[in-house]
Amino acid sequence: GTPITNTTSQHHHHHQHHHPIKEKKGRRRGEEEEETNPQRPRPRQQPWPTCTPRTNTESREGRYEERLGATPPPDRRSERKVTRHVKQPHLGFCNLDQTRTGSWLARHPMLLLAHLLVAGLSFSPPSLQIKTASRAQLIFPGCHHAKRASRGRADSDLRLAPQLESRLNIRRRIMLRSNRQQTRLRVAAVLECGTQMVPQQKVKEKVVASVARTEEEGEEKEEGWHPNSWRSKPVQQQPTYEDREGLGRALETISSLPPLVQHWETRQLRKRLEEVFHGKRFVVQGGDCAEKFSDCNPTALESRVKVLEQMRIILERLPPVLAGKNKTIPVSVIRRAAGQYGKPRTNEFEVVRGVNIPVFKGDNVNSLVDTAAERKADPSRLLEGCLRAQCTMNYLRSRMGSGMLEYIDPETWRFREMDPRIVQYMRLALETERGNGPSAGSHEVYTSHEGLLLNLEQTLTKPLPQEILRGFVQSETPKSSIQFSKARHYNSGAHMLWIGTRTKHLNGAHTEYFRGIDNPVGIKVGMDTDPDFAVSLVRTVDPSNSPGKVVLISRFGAGDVKSGLPKLAQAVRDKGLNVIWFVDPMHGNTRKTSAGFKTRDFESVLSEIQDTHHILKEHGLRLGGIHLELTGEDVTECVGGSPVTPPLTDDDLALNWKSACDPRLNYQQSIELALQVANVLSKDLAGEQSLNM
C-alpha cells in the first residue's frame, strides 16, 4: 500500500486512473513503462475508486493538493463487480485521494463519515456543524486522538487537503454541540445519498432538510413554548419597575450565577412524588409565608430545620408504634425556603397614616418599611434574593449532610409541652429512628416557592442537557412510569413550584410558563375552582398525565371543605388524572381580629386536614401530604394548639407577632399538629386498606 513518488508519477498519463494500493513492493523499474501501454488490461477495480480521482498524488512528506479531475469512463468489464461492492454505503461516495489517507479512511467507516460531514457542511452556520466531538477530533491534524487512532502511523498520514485543512483551522475554535439526534440525521442523509451516488451538493441539501425537519418537529412538540412565551399572555401580580435598565442588569447578573438546584435533583423529587402517588411515601411541605432577608441567619434557619426534622420523625416513626405494625411509610420534607421572597396581594395599594402607598409584595420586590420610597419596586432586590437563597441552600445542604443525629436525642425534645399520654409513644419512636436510621430520601434537600415573578422565573429557567436526560430515561424507565421524553427546560431556582389562587388562569401567563418546565408543579384549588376548569388546567400543565408532575393543593377552609372538595375529587377521578393531593389548611382558615391582626385557629387547621383525608379516602384517592406555613420560633400568630399550657388567644397575638404577611404555626403548635396527623395516618396503617387510584 505504499504510494508512488512524485518522480514516478510524472511518467503517467494525466487521464490514467492509477491505484497505488494495488502495486507490489517487488516491482522492477522496467515494469513501470509497461503500465502506460493502452492495450494492456487495466488492473482490477477497487470498490471505492469509482468516484472522482485527484490528479496529483501524495508526496513522501505527506503533502498533496486537491484538484478535481474528469471522471474516467467506466470499465464495462468490471461494472458488475463494482456495482456489487457499492452496496456498502460508506464506500460509494468517498472523494478521497488514492493514498494512505484514503486507504486508512476506507478501513474506518466512522472516521470516513466524520470526514465527509466536515467537508460537506463547510458552508453551514454553527447550528449545522458536527455534533459528535469525539469523532470530529479524529480528523483534526496533530491532535492526540488522531495520533492514538492511527496505531503507529505518522501524523502526516492523517492530513487533509489544504482547502479542507484551512476550513478546519477556522473551525477549531468553535464549540461542537453534542446533540446526537441531529448527528444521526446527518449521517443518515449522507448514507442515503451515498447509496444513490449523488453529487456532494445533494448531500448538503438533504442534511439541511433533515435538520430543518427536526427543528419543525421540536416546535410542534412544544407547541410554540419558550421560556419567554408567557409574555404573549395576560399577566397578573407583576410589580412595575421604574428603573428598566436596572432590572435588565439585575436579571443579566442572575442569569450568570450558578443554578440553585440541579436538574437531576428535580427528577429525583419527581420520583419521590411518584412514590407518594402510589401510597409509598408521605410529604410535609412547610416554611415561612414570606421569607425575610433578615432571617437568613443561622439561628432562624436552624429553628426551621429543627421543627421540620422533628415533624418528619413523628410522621414517619409514630404511626407504626400507634398501630402496632412494623411497616413504615417514609416521609419527605419539601421546604418553603430559599426563594419564597415574593407574595401575591389582593390590593395594589394601602393607606398608611393617610397616605396611599404600594403594598408590601415580598423582600425581593420592595421593603416592609411603610413609606412611599421604600415601597417602590427595586430590581436590585431580585439579585439580593438570589444570593440569600444560595446562602440558605448551602446551610440546608450542610445540615442535612450532617445526619441530624442530635434530633434523635430525647433531651432535644420539649416533651413537657406534649400530652403525657403521647410522650411514651414518642420515646419508642425515637428509639426506632435511632436503631434503624433515617429512611431512604428522608435527608434529601428539596425547596419550593410560588412561581410568581415571571421575569425572575424566566431568568432561572435552564435547558435540560439532552445527553444526560436520555441516559436518565434509559436507566429509570423500567422502574418508573414517569414520562420524561418531552422535557426540555427546568427551573433552577427551586425543586418544586406552585401556581397560586390569584394566578391560575387557563389562558394566563403563569399557566403558559408552568406548562413548559420539567419541575413538579403545585396548583392551589379551593371554593373558587370549578371542577371542569381544574381538569383543563391539569391537562394543560401536564399533557402526558404523568404521576409526580402535578400536585393539587386544596385550600377550602374547615367550613367549606365538605361541600367543595367532593365535587372536585370526583371530577379528577372520573377523568383519570394522575395527580397527587396535598392539603393547605392555612389559607382557607385565615380571619382578622378586632385589633386588626390576621390569625388562624389551630382547631380549624386540624379539622380541615382530617376532613380532607376522609373525603379523599371515600373517593378512592389518597392524601399525600400537608402544606403548612410554620416556623420553629415561639411566635404568637395562630391561636390555640396546646394541650398542656394555656392556649394562645386573640389577646396574645401582639406579644410576639413577627410574620411579614400571614400568621404561622409556632414550634409547639407545629409539633402538636404532627402528632395529630400521625394519629390519623396510624388508623390507615392499622386498617391496611387498599385504595383504588
Image: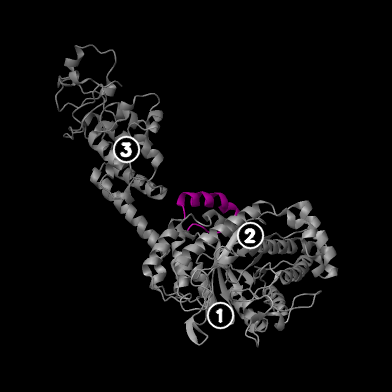
The N terminus sits in image quarter = top left
Q: Is residue 469 magenta?
A: yes
Q: Position of residue 608 (x, y in %)?
A: 69, 78
Is residue 562 visible in the rendered image? The answer is yes
Q: Position of residue 532 (x, y in %)?
A: 53, 79
Density class for disc 2 (Cα within 10 Å; few <14, some 14-19, many ≥20) is few
Amino acid type assigned to the residue bearing label 3 in the image: His
Which residue corresponds to mark 3? 115
Q: Which residues are magenta?
A: 464-486
Q: Where is 450 relative to 468, above or below?
A: below
Which residue corresponds to mark 2? 298
Density class for disc 3 (Cα within 10 Å; few <14, some 14-19, many ≥20) is many
Amino acid type assigned to the residue bearing label 1 in the image: Thr
Q: Main secondary structure of the magenta part?
A: helix
Residue at image point 50% right, 68% down: 364
Residue 528: quarter of image: bottom right
Q: Position of residue 66 (x, y in %)?
A: 21, 33
CA distance for labels 1 and 2: 40 Å
Which residue corresponds to mark 1? 529
